[in-house]
Image: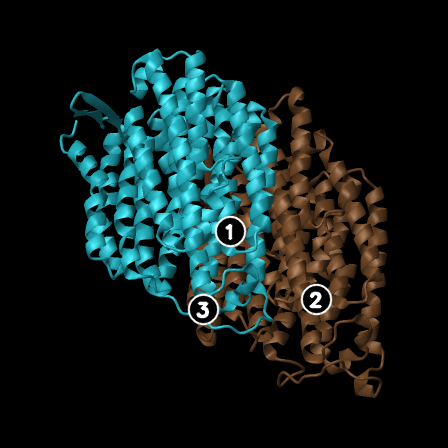
């Protein structure tokens, strides 16, 4: 075991906190400052990858009488890398965004410590192997996210943010009750320990039901998604990007981790979760299709796309090993592709709105001529969301279809087909508006080049990931699979 | 090393051209045109090099894994390189034409960028080495043609583009499901590994038949098989070079080429025949040929008549596939090229009439032959070729289809061929009659709808030369059919190398 590895990991996890505080005192003026300050973090994770693959990174934190378990395996190392890249991109984008949107300096400065806290919380969630540590990460993440949503300071932002806070608190309450039940029944909070001793008896089931309810609420899974779209409506673009790409995914990650360990054979319940996902795909798609403003389209699209992830539950529970392996890889590929593409899409949409000064779809007329790069980025990101080749979304859909066909779970094939068609419908509704030529001339504000470049790189990464998918997926398989 | 270099380099010519075009400013007219033409010429050179190498027995292939047990494969085989040759040759002519056609119109950067992307997709389709890779480029083709169809931004263009998307995206999903089902059944089948499916036992026959028809439904939308052809005539609102490319090599041909790959390289002709799939294809193709010829007869707009003619002509390819035996196969493969050359000529000419004289309807063509003799000559070559007049290429296709039908024991196909040739004549000859024999505005009868004098000759040279060149190519492909590297000779070579039982 490499002795430098553990300190290195914790350095990479904790570093966002001081960086955020520093940026609070002295907000960065240029994107390259951000890149220089935080660019080392993904590199550190990259360096840690081989050791994470060997399973060499795990341990205990002793805090007084409490010992907290953590580990970094192939999946969580890749998720950490993804998180750092998306956060870095959003941070760089935020610098340009402040200038373009002429934000109040004081409230913009508060963005940085919250972003640092969020980065730390997400890292904590990925490495936690212990319900208590997970709780800390989850709470910190929720609070930072709410804080970021409140930053604009407008009435509707505060109203939506407080509603988000309420939902998050209810979710946390359910989570705490569930954890208490599990602790009472099995006497441990460590995930590996729980897996060894816990039986799916009544108390486990009730505990899991509470945990699941809380997490579904935090992950905005249908029908508990009510808070998601309003908070995005008035949030700043970089905040929306981080939230849609990462925050909701973390709750899903915890959910699937717990189910795999504690309820691996609960087929009926897994199907129920799958049905929730299916409804999310359809409902989110329909609402995105009917939405009037660009930001609502993107936000509703998150609700729909999260549904695909939920299909993992029925495809894991009680299916053949080959099916489970395919669904497992498909889900993480879908998650990564969606994270990159959704961040890119929020930023591209933000660029279009900043540049045209309007947010309705009909106001996009003429953008195809005047803002080709932002529109192109939107389109490339949409390719992943639609699951068209070559993109991570496509490769993931191929695997999901294969898993559904091989296990004979036909309903999911229909869900994938309808979801794709609905996504195409709302994406091309946006693009169609941009192609209209006879539009009133309006002033287009030019954007700094970096604000176009960051989302373009993210969108291209989502596309490219579809072609090089074997690289992360081979690591996932090596790391033990489902 | 060079085996991997050439497929990637050929694909990159158009991809890199597309990327640079998007980065160039809208006003960089000369740089964009120069880049486009240089890339097109370079690509023809690369494809020609691979044709030469293939005929000397070299292999060009590159692959890497995308998923466990599934690879991205680019491979130049004789069949694929044939389609690649057509695509790169027509890219050059269409680019020249488009430069002239879009002179001074807005959004040229977007147009040429997506145009190059569209050509890159057709090249990817031709070099794809398995169904997965094929699907990647097939869908990329859908995406890159949408902005071309919607180019003008008018409500009509946007509606046509939306209709096009509805058809093609739904078809792409159907195709994907079929491919995943086949993959689940048999794993990653490289094109040419016909033995994999041939070894399946009788209990899998039903599944194989079902998957085949699912895939045909997916390909059939782009190939314009009746009743899945509804998008094609509507997509005619696109600018003329787009229609030309769409009908000659890009979208419609991609569907037909997919069917060729499916039958000859995945299922294999023997298995397809044994499963009774070929007869079904022949019947669908015959229905499509007759129905769309009748529809063409009823159209009064020139481009729409050409569109329905495309639907019927592309189904000759499918008909040839349906005729079991080498002659039917030769007919199918060579017609893939022949139809491309003839149809692109016709669309170029239709565009010239519209640009120079403002003519869109057939009854406005009276006397246009004297006003625009070279364009009309090219149009006549294309039209007579479509009818099947010897020694033009269309005759060769029909001849091989006819004797292929006898060889396959399906004499009723000859009746279809005769009927369709008569229908072809019925909808093309009146056009020729109006062009050459009816007195028009130059004789003092009526007036041109909107006459412009675009160039020194009868119209701009950018518009005239591509039409003449492709017309010349289609004449030569017929006259010199016996020489090496003619479409017919290459198709025969493909068949004798790979598909002879």
Q: Position of residue A122 (x, y in %)?
A: 31, 38
Question: Quadrant where the C terminus of chain A lies?
Answer: top left
Same chain check for tags 1 and 2: no
The mark that comes first in sequence, 3 or 2, is 3
Q: Is residue B113 above or below residue A319?
A: below
Callout 1 touching callout 2 (CB < 8 Å): no
Q: Is residue A370 above or below residue B49?
A: below
State which chain disc 3 sits on: B
Instruction: Count the marks.
Output: 3
Q: Which residue carries the number 3 mark?
A: B35
State which chain disc 1 sits on: A
Question: Which numbered circle lies on residue B346?
Answer: 2
Residue drawn at 63 percent across, 44 percent down: B170
Q: Which residue carries the number 1 mark?
A: A296
Q: Which structural element holds mark 1? A: helix
Q: Residues within 10 Å of mark 2 (few under 14, many from 20)?
A: many
Alpha-carbon distance for marks 1 and 2? 47 Å
Question: Which numbered circle lies on residue B311?
Answer: none
Q: Position of residue A6 (x, y in %)?
A: 18, 32
What colour has chain A?
Answer: cyan
Q: Is residue A65 above or below residue B89?
A: above
Which of the 4 image quadrants contains residue B265? top right
Q: Which structural element holds mark 2? A: helix
Relative to B267, is B406 on the left or the right? right
Which one is closest to the eye, mark 3 or mark 1? 1
Colour scheme employed for the rendering of this structure: by chain
What colour has chain B?
Answer: brown
Alpha-carbon distance for marks 3 and 1? 40 Å
Relative to A476, is B304 on the left or the right? right
Q: Residues within 10 Å of mark 3 (few under 14, many from 20)?
A: some
Residue drawn at 23 percent across, 31 percent down: A51
């Amino acid at each position: 075991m490499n002795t430098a590895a553990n300190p290195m990991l914790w350095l990479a996890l904790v570093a966002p906190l001081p960086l955020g505080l520093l940026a609070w005192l002295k907000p960065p003026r240029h994107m390259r400052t951000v890149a220089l300050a935080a660019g080392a973090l993904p590199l550190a994770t990259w360096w840690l990858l081989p050791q994470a693959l060997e399973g060499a990174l795990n341990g205990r934190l002793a805090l007084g009488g409490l010992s907290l378990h953590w580990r970094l395996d192939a999946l969580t190392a890749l998720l950490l890398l993804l998180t750092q890249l998306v956060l870095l991109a959003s941070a760089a984008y935020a610098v340009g965004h402040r200038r373009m949107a002429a934000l109040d300096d004081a409230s913009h400065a508060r963005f940085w410590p919250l972003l640092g806290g969020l980065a730390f919380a997400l890292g904590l969630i990925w490495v936690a192997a212990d319900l208590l540590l997970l709780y800390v990460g989850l709470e910190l993440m929720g609070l930072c996210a709410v804080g970021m949503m409140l930053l604009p300071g407008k009435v509707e932002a505060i109203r939506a943010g407080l509603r988000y806070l309420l939902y998050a608190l209810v979710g946390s309450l359910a989570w705490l009750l569930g954890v208490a039940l599990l602790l009472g029944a099995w006497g441990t909070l460590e995930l590996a320990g729980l897996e060894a001793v816990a039986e799916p008896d009544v108390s486990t089931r009730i505990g899991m039901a509470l945990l699941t309810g809380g997490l579904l609420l935090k992950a905005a899974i249908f029908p508990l998604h009510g808070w998601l779209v309003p908070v995005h409506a008035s949030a700043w673009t970089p905040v929306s990007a981080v939230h849609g790409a990462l925050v909701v995914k973390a709750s899903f990650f915890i959910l699937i981790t717990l189910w795999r360990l504690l309820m691996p054979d609960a087929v009926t319940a897994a199907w129920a979760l799958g049905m929730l996902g299916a409804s999310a795909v359809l409902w989110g798609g329909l609402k995105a299709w009917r939405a009037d403003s660009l930001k609502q389209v993107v936000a509703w699209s998150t609700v729909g796309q999260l549904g695909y992830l939920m299909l993992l539950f029925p495809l894991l529970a009680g299916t053949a090993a080959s099916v489970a392996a395919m669904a497992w890889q498909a889900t993480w590929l879908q998650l990564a592709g969606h994270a990159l593409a959704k961040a890119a899409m929020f930023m591209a949409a933000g660029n279009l709105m900043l540049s045209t000064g309007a947010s309705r779809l009909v106001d996009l007329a003429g953008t195809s001529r005047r803002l080709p790069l932002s529109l192109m980025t939107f389109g490339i990101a949409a390719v992943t969301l639609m699951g068209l080749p070559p993109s991570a979304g496509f490769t993931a859909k191929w695997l999901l279809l294969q898993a559904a066909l091989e296990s004979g779970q036909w309903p999911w094939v229909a869900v994938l087909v309808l979801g794709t068609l609905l996504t195409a419908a709302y994406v091309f509704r946006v693009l169609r508006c941009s192609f209209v030529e006879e539009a009133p001339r309006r002033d287009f504000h030019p954007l700094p080049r970096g604000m176009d470049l960051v989302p373009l790189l993210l969108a291209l990464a989502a596309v490219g990931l579809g072609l090089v998918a074997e690289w992360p997926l081979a690591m996932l398989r090596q790391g033990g699979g489902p | 090393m060079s085996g991997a270099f050439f497929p990637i380099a050929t694909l990159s010519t158009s991809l890199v051209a597309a990327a640079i075009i998007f980065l160039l400013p809208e006003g960089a007219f000369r740089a964009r045109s120069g880049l486009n033409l240089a890339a097109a010429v370079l690509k023809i050179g690369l494809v020609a090099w691979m044709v030469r190498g293939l005929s000397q027995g070299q292999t060009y292939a590159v692959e890497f894994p995308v998923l466990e047990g599934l690879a991205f494969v680019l491979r130049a085989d004789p069949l694929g390189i044939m389609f690649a040759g057509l695509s790169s040759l027509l890219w050059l002519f269409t680019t020249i034409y488009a430069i002239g056609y879009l002179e001074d119109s807005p959004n040229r950067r977007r147009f040429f960028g997506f145009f190059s992307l569209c050509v890159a997709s057709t090249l990817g389709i031709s070099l794809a080495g398995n169904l997965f890779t094929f699907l990647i480029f097939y869908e990329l083709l859908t995406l890159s043609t949408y902005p071309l169809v919607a180019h003008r931004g008018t409500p009509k263009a946007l509606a046509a583009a939306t209709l096009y998307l509805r058809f093609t995206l739904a078809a792409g999903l159907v195709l994907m499901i079929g491919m995943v089902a086949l993959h689940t059944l048999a794993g990653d089948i490289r094109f040419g590994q016909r033995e994999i499916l041939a070894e399946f036992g009788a209990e899998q026959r039903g599944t194989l038949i079902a998957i085949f028809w699912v895939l045909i439904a997916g390909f059939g939308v782009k190939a314009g098989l009746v009743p899945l052809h509804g998008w094609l005539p509507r997509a005619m609102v696109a600018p003329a070079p787009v229609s030309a490319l769409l009908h000659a090599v890009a979208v419609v041909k991609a569907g037909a080429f997919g069917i060729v790959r499916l039958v000859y390289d995945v299922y294999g002709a023997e298995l397809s025949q044994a499963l009774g799939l070929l007869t079904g294809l022949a019947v669908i193709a015959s229905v499509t040929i007759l129905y769309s010829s009748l529809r063409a007869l009823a159209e009064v707009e020139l481009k729409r008549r050409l569109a329905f003619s495309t639907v019927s002509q592309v189904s000759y390819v499918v008909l040839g596939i349906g005729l079991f035996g080498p002659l039917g196969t030769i007919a199918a493969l060579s017609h893939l090229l022949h139809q491309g050359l003839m149809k692109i000529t016709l669309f170029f000419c239709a565009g010239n009439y519209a640009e120079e004289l403002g003519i869109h309807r057939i009854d406005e063509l009276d006397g246009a032959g004297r006003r625009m003799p070279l364009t009309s000559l090219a149009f006549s070559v294309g039209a007579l070729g479509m009818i099947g007049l010897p020694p033009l290429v269309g005759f060769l296709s029909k001849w091989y289809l006819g004797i292929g039908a006898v060889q396959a024991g399906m004499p009723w196909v000859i009746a279809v061929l005769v009927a369709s040739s008569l229908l072809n004549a019925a909808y093309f000859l009146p056009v020729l009659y109006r062009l050459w024999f009816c007195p028009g505005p130059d004789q003092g009868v009526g007036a041109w709808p909107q006459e412009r004098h675009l160039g020194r000759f009868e119209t701009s040279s950018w518009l005239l030369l591509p039409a003449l060149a492709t017309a010349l190519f289609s004449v030569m492909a017929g006259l010199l059919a016996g020489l090496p590297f003619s479409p017919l000779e290459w198709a025969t070579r493909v068949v004798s190398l790979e598909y002879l039982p």
